[in-house]
Image (tube, coloured by chain):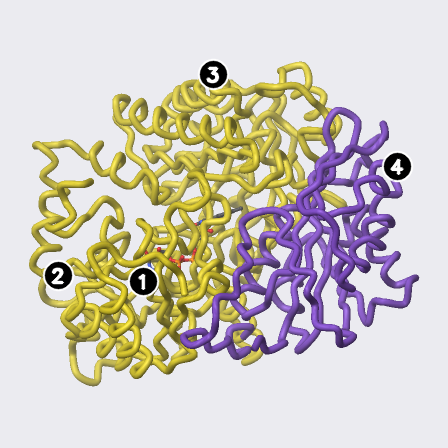
Amino acid sequence: MAWDVSRRTVMSGGAVGAAVAGLGIGRSALAKRPLKIIVIEEAEVPESRLFAETFVNSGRAAKVIRIDRTLNGLLHELAIGEGVLVGLTSDPAAMIAEQVLLADGARPLLKWAHHYRKMRWEHRTDGAPALLARASTGWPTVLANHMQDALGGSRQAPDLRCESGHCGLDGKSPGMLVSWAFEVGVQQS
Amino acid sequence: MSTRMPHGVDAATFRKALDELAAIVGKEWVFVDELPLSAYRDAYSPLADGEMLPSAAVAPANMEQIQQALKVFNAYKLPIWTFGNGRNFAYGGPAPRQSGYVMFDLKRMNRILEVNEKYGYALVEPGVSYFQLYRHLRQIGSKLWIDPAAPGWGGVMGNALEHGAGYTPYGDHFVMQCGMEVVLADGQVVRTGQGAIEGSQHWQSTKHAAGPHFDGMFTQSNFGVVTKMGIWLMPEPPGYKPFMITYEREEDLAAIFDAVKPLKVNQVIPNAAVAVDLLWEVSAKTTRRHYFDGKGPVPDSIRKKIASDHGLGMWNFYAALYGPPPIIENNWKLVEEAMMSIPGAKLHLNRENDPAWDYRVRLMRGEPNMTEFSIMNWIGGGGHINFSPISAPDGKEALSQYNLIKQRCHDFGFDYIGEFLVGWRDMHHILMIMYDRADEAMRKSAYDLFGKLVDEAADAGFGEYRTHLAFMDQIAKTYKHNDGALWDLHHRLKDVLDPNGILSPGKQGIWPQAMRSQA
Ligand SMILES: Cc1cc2nc3c(=O)[nH]c(=O)nc-3n(C[C@H](O)[C@H](O)[C@H](O)COP(=O)(O)OP(=O)(O)OC[C@H]3O[C@@H](n4cnc5c(N)ncnc54)[C@H](O)[C@@H]3O)c2cc1C
C-alpha cells in the first residue's frame, strides 16, 4: 500500500509553505544534489509522449513510467523511493497523481496549466513565455526543456501567461493539460 | 502549523489536545502543516478556494486508538470528520463539512480480516480499497469477484456507507453489506446483527438478528465510527455476456425503461442496467473542444455529428448477463426481444479500441479501474459535482426528469452529461455537472444550477440519494413530511448518542444541538 510509505512527522516541523491549490507553485529550491528524475507519460496523450521523449533525449530521465488509459498505473507505480516525478498529463491524471503523492508525503514543486482555446495553446507557467509562445505543436518539447531549467533552479517571474501561434489540436489530445513535478522521499529539514 | 482552529477552541488548548492525540496515535500520525493537510482538499469543489479546510488530521491504527482519541475529542469538544479512503470526489472528496474540523483519517486501518470462499464474503477495515481487495482475491486464488464503483481507488466500506453503486449484480453496496462493528462517540464498541452473539460464525452471512436492524443508522450519518464491515462477494459465474445497445433519439429513454423494468424486476438482467447519454459516453474518447468552441451547450447539430463519428446513440444502454451459458442464451432471447424492439436500436457485443466500452465491460465483471476519470476531460479544469435524484424505473418518469434537468443545464449554459442506472427497483439519475474551476463565473453557475435543481426536483417529488457537502443542509430540508419529522428523529438520536457533537457535525444535514441553529 502506498500509505505504508512513511509520512513525515509534521507536529514539530516548520511550515512547509507551498499551497497546492494554485498554479505556479514553483519552489524551484530543489536541493542542489542531482536527483533522479522520473517522467510519467500518459501514453494516449500525444503531448505527454513528446514531453517524455524530450526528457529521455536530454539524458535527464532516469526512467519513464507509462500510464495507459485505465489510469491505474497512477495508483500502483508512483512509489519510486526518492527522486522527482514529472509529467505533462491530462487534468484528471494530474489530479489523481497529486492526491496519491501528497498522501505519500511528496512535496509539490510546480504545477502549470496548458489550455487549448480558439485555435491556440494558452500556457500558464513560471517563466519562459517567449519560448512557449513561439512554439506551436512542438510546445511540449520547449516545456520539457524549460521544466528541466526550472527544476535546476533558474527560476523566473511567477505565474505568466502566454499564447502560442495558431495551431490545430491533435484528435487524441484532451486539449487541457497540466504539467507538474513532485519531489518524493526527501526529508525536509 | 495551519492557522485554522476548530470553532471555539483557542490555539493553546488545541495544541494541548494535539499533544494528547500524538501520544495515542504517534507523533507522525498527527498532521498540522499546510502541505500534508492539502491532501484533504476537495479538488473538484464547487466552492471558492479556501473553504472546507481542516485544522489538523489524526490517523489512528486500530480500534483501541480510536476509543482513546474519542476521549480526547470529547474532552476538548473537537469536531472531527471521519472517513476511510477519502476518495468521495463529486460529493466532497475527503474534505470536512466546515473549515476547522479535525480529519479522522482511517486509511491506516486497511486490513482484510477475512475472505470466506465458501459463503462468499469479506470482512474489511475502513481503509481497504477496491484495488486492494481485488488484488488480494487474485493473490489467494479466490474465485470471488468484487463490485467496484467506477473509481477503483474508492473504499469498500466508505462507498457502501455512502449508499454507493457498482455494476455487477452485487452493485447495490449497502444491500450487500452484512454486519458492522462500530465505535460510538463515548467509545463503546457495538457489533450489529449476529455479531452481537459471542463467538458467532455467521456475522457476515445473515443480516438478521433479534431486535431492530441498526446498520443503516451508521450509513450517511454521524452516529458512530465504523471499524469493521462485512461485504458479500459474488462467486465468479461460469458465463458472462456484456452488451451495449445504442438508441438514436432522446425520446427513446421512455421506451428503454419501459422495456428494462420487467427484465430488472424479474432478474433477467441481474446487474445495474445503465442508460448513458451521448456526451458522457463520448467523453472517454474526445472532448468538447474538438467539436465546439462556443459558449453554452453543444448544439443539436453537433451532437448528431458526434454520435455519427463515434457510432453512438443519444442513449447508450449497458448491461450484462451472468450464469451458465445455456441460461445466458435463454435470457438473451428475452433481452433481445424487448430491448431491440425500439426502432433504430443497434446491438454491440464488442467494440474495438473503445475505452468507454472497455471500462464498462471491466466494471460489469468486477475489475477496478480509473478510466471513468477521463470523462473529466470533456471540459477540463477539474470541477465536478454529481446531482443524483432517485425514483422508480418508469419510462415516462425518466423522460420527464431528463427533460427538466437538461433544460435547466442548458439555461445555465451547461451540457447535460448524465446516466440513468436501474438497480433492484430504483432508478438513480446521475447528472455530472462539469466546470473549469479556474473560471470563476462557471464555477458559480454550477453551484447555482445545483441549488436550483435540488428545489425543483423536490417540488416534483424527488429526493437525492447522496450529495456534496455544500448541499447537505438544503437537501435535508427537502425531506419535509410532517414538519421534517425524519430529520427531527436524526437530531434526537444525535443528541443522545453524541451529546458533545464531535462526530462529523453537519454530515447529511445532521447537526449537534449546539450547532443546529446555524444550519
Ligand atoms: C469520475 C467519478 C466516477 C464516480 N463513479 C462512482 C460510481 O460508479 N459509484 C459510486 O458509488 N460513486 C462514484 N463516484 C463517487 C465516489 O468517488 C465514490 O463513491 C467513492 O467510492 C467514495 O469514496 P470512498 O469510497 O473513498 O469513501 P470515503 O471518502 O472514505 O467515505 C465516504 C463517506 O462515508 C463516511 N465514512 C467513511 N468511512 C467511515 C467510517 N469508517 N465510519 C463512519 N463514517 C465513514 C464519511 O461520511 C465519508 O465522508 C464517482 C466519482 C467520480 C469523480
Q: Secondary structure at mark 3?
A: helix
Badge nearest the viewer, 4 or 3 = 4
The span from disc 4 to disc 3 (Cα, nearest Å) is 39 Å
Q: Is residue A15 left or right of residue A50?
A: left
The span from disc 3 to disc 2 (Cα, nearest Å) is 44 Å
Kind of residue sitting beneath label 3: Asp
Above or below, comparing residue B215 to residue B409 in the picture: below
Badge nearest the viewer, 3 or 2 = 2
Whether residue B366 appears in this view of the structure is no
Residue furthest front as drawn:
A157
Palette colour of chain B: yellow
Q: Are marks 1 and 3 in contact (CB under 8 Å)?
A: no
Could you confirm whether marks 1 and 3 are on the same chain? yes
State which tag comes first along the sequence, 1 or 3: 1
The span from disc 4 to disc 1 (Cα, nearest Å) is 48 Å
Q: Secondary structure at mark 2?
A: loop
Kind of residue sitting beneath label 4: Arg
Quarter of the image that includes the C terminus of chain B? top left
Could you confirm whether marks 3 and 2 are on the same chain? yes
Report the disc number at residue A134.
4
Residue B509, horizontal then vertical, whole percent: 23, 44
User: Which of B471 and A180 lies nearest the eye of the viewer?
Assistant: A180
Which residue lies under the disc numbered 1? Answer: B102
Q: Quadrant of ligand 1?
A: bottom left
Could you confirm whether marks 4 and 1 are on the same chain? no
Within 10 Å of disc 2 (Cα), the crowding (few <14, some 14-19, many 20+) is many
Badge nearest the viewer, 1 or 3 = 1
Residue B124, horizontal then vertical, whole percent: 38, 72
